[in-house]
Amino acid sequence: MNLDNIIKSRLSKVMDIDYLSINYDTKKHVNHKNYDGGGHIELEIVSSAFEGLSLLDQHKLVYKALEGMIKKEIHALAIKTTSTSDWKKE
């Protein structure tokens, strides 16, 4: 299973996903001194699971889903979370 599918699978276990975008920024960092091989990933997630949660709690939910991947498959993670109701307003 590729990394996109693993991320989507793990997130789907803890939330219903209305929209998910996974972008990679790894190639810009390959030659950095501290680069250890993990991916630099940007996630944009829309989910009803974020309703009523603070931004911090939304991000904690994402990190919990990806637990064990951070510092291994994922070296750096940027997250943009939006609740389904806010997404529908846009």
Image (cartoon, rainbow, N blue to C red):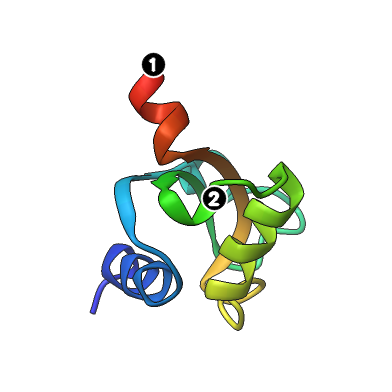
Residue to which mark 2 is pinned: 50
Residue drawn where x is 54% and y is 47% of the image: 51
Q: Is residue 51 above or below residue 15?
A: above
At x 58% / y 45%, what residue is drawn? 79
Which residue reaches farthest bottom? Answer: 68
Quarter of the image where the N terminus is located: bottom left
- Residue lying farthest to the top in this orientation: 90
Q: In the image, residue 42 lies at what x, y percent?
A: 50, 44
Q: Which residue is mark 1?
A: 90
Where residue 14 appears, as percent x and y from the top left, is 45, 73
Vertical placement of 2 versus 24: above or below?
Answer: below
Q: Position of residue 38 (x, y in %)?
A: 56, 66
Residue 85 can be seen in this image: yes
Relative to 83, 29 lies left or right: right
Whichever of labels 1 and 2 marks the residue nearer the N terminus, that label is: 2
Quarter where residue 28 is shown? top right
Q: Amino acid at mark 2?
A: Phe
Question: Is 36 positioned to the left or the right of 6 in the image?
Answer: right
Vertical arrangement, residue 53 with respect to residue 75, above or below:
above
Q: Can you say whether 64 is above or below 22 in the image? A: below
**Residue 6 locus on image (x, y percent):** 34, 74
Given the image, on which type of amino acid does mark 1 rest? Glu
* Closer to the camera in the image, 20 or 39: 20
